[in-house]
Each structure stands twice: as structure tokens, then as C-alpha cells.
Amino acid sequence: MITLYAFKWVPPFAQGLVRDLRVRWALEEAGVPYATRLLGLGDQDQPEYRAIQPWGQVPAIEEDGLVLFESGAIVLHIAERSEALMPRDPAGRAKTVQWVTASLDSVDAYIGPLADIDLFHAGEAWTAERRPQVVETIRRRLDGLARRLDGREHLEDRFTAGDLMMATVLRGLRDTDLVTGHPVLGPYLARCEARPAFGRALEAQLAPFRENEPAMENA
Ligand SMILES: N[C@@H](CCC(=O)N[C@@H](CS)C(=O)NCC(=O)O)C(=O)O
């Protein structure tokens, strides 16, 4: 049985965005059952967990002695065993790997700096100058993606792990209208999120956050 490492709780701005969502979604699409090990405060820095994930981040998985980190690598590993995530023919497999890689290298890498500005450095003077440049760069990345998706349901001729990864990357812009207000990307993301497996994965990530909500100070 696969054991997935995830967080017990994260602040609301990150809930629904933590990268174990990708792994949960892939497992749901593939119909593979899994157990979770939830990391609390300080667990990330313990040597036992650093031996599993060098930077103390989530997600990571363990299965029959195999330890794997990096959400893209884990999703592809799951896709290897499920046609629901990756076609069996060599070209279909190659295209799936291509889109998983593109979601991370060609889209996510450009979205990260905006989250950094909006979530971790909000209100700092330097962000006023930098933010418009970051948004413009993201827009150009989204334009390329939208041109690909215009007139298509998915990145290829069917849903694959590439769409799963791309959708979770696009969710990282949920506090802006860059995706939700986009005539091609908004409906694309909505289509991906309408999949029952996504709903189950999201709920599985959010449930522990509700259960482990920190007590309000002075409450
Ligand atoms: N490239 C890694 C990134 C993992 C990552 O950034 N995880 C975040 C949660 S989404 C995390 O654990 N952050 C806490 C930290 O960095 O201490 C992957 O895709 O798995």
C-alpha cells in the first residue's frame, strides 16, 4: 500500500494548493488505495523525514521500500500503472511525460514568483515594481498554453497526467483572474476540476486541515 506524506494543517491561503493534491488526484484517477502520514509542526525537520524528502517538503510516498519525492515524479510513477492517466502506446506515454514536464518547467516555474510576492512579501515596497513584470511573464506563458488548448478539451486527445499536473499548477493563480477570467483556460481548469477524482482528492486534503485547526489564542 502506498503511504503518502502530507501536512496535518496549513494556513487557509495554502489549503487546496498543497502539492500532495496532485498525488491524491492521480491515485484517485488510478483507483489505487493509499494511506497517509501527516506531518505536524517540526516533523519536517526531523532527520527521519529529511531522509525521505531532502528539503522536508511534501509530497513524498513510500511503497514496498521505494521512497519517492517530487510531485511530478510521483504522478508519473502512478501513471505507469494506470491507463486512466497515461496511454500505453509509446507516443502517448512520451506526450504525457512532455506535458507533466511542461506544467512544471514552462508554467509553474513562472507562477511561483507571483505567489512569493502576493503571499510572502505582500505590501513590501519592492513588489510594486516587480509584480507587473511577473504578471506579464505569466500572461505570456498562459497565452502559449491557451493557444494549444483553444478548441480542445485536453492537452492531447484525452485526459492524462499532463492535464492533472497542469490543472493543479493553474490553481496556483486562484487569487487572481488570470485563469478564471480567461476564455480558454478558465473552462479548461473547470473541466479538470469537475472530475469526480479531483473532488475526492481535494476533500481528502482538506479534511485533516479541518480536524487539526489550531485553537485560536485567547479563545
Ligand atoms: N518540487 C517539489 C516542491 C514541493 C513543495 O514545494 N512542497 C511545499 C508544499 S506545496 C512544502 O512542502 N512547503 C513547505 C516547505 O518548503 O517547508 C514537488 O513538486 O514535490
Image (tube, helix red, strand yellow):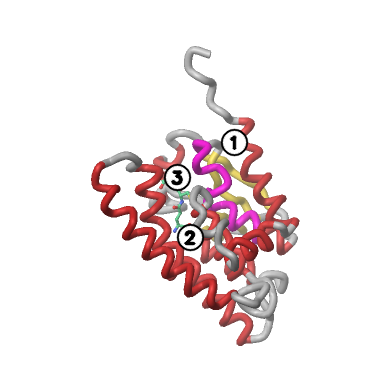
Marks 3 and 1 close (CB-CB < 8 Å): no
| Mark 2 or 1: the one toward you | 1
Is label 2 within 8 A of ligand 1 (CB to nearest ligand atom)? yes
Q: Label 2, on which residue?
A: 70
> Height in image: 137 above or below 52?
below
The x and y percentages for residue 108 are 45, 62
Marks 3 and 2 close (CB-CB < 8 Å): no
- Label 2 sits on what residue type? Glu
- N-terminal of the pair, mark 2 or mark 1, is 2
- N-terminal of the pair, mark 3 or mark 2, is 3
- Label 3 sits on what residue type? Glu
Q: Secondary structure at mark 2?
A: loop
Residue extending furthest top?
Answer: 218
Res. 209 mark:
1
Q: Residue at position x 53%, y 26% from top?
A: 214
- Label 1 sits on what residue type? Phe
The x and y percentages for residue 32 are 72, 59
> Height in image: 81 above or below 170?
below
Alpha carbon of mark 3 to alpha carbon of mark 2: how far? Answer: 17 Å
Q: Residue at position x 53%, y 51% from top?
A: 174
Is label 3 within 8 A of ligand 1 (CB to nearest ligand atom)? no
- N-terminal of the pair, mark 3 or mark 1, is 3
Res. 48 mark:
3
Location of the N terminus (image quadrant): bottom right
Alpha carbon of mark 3 to alpha carbon of mark 1: how far? Answer: 23 Å
Nearest the viewer among 113 and 35 is 113
Alpha carbon of mark 2 to alpha carbon of mark 1: how far? Answer: 22 Å
The x and y percentages for residue 52 are 46, 52
Q: Which residues are magenta?
A: 10-26
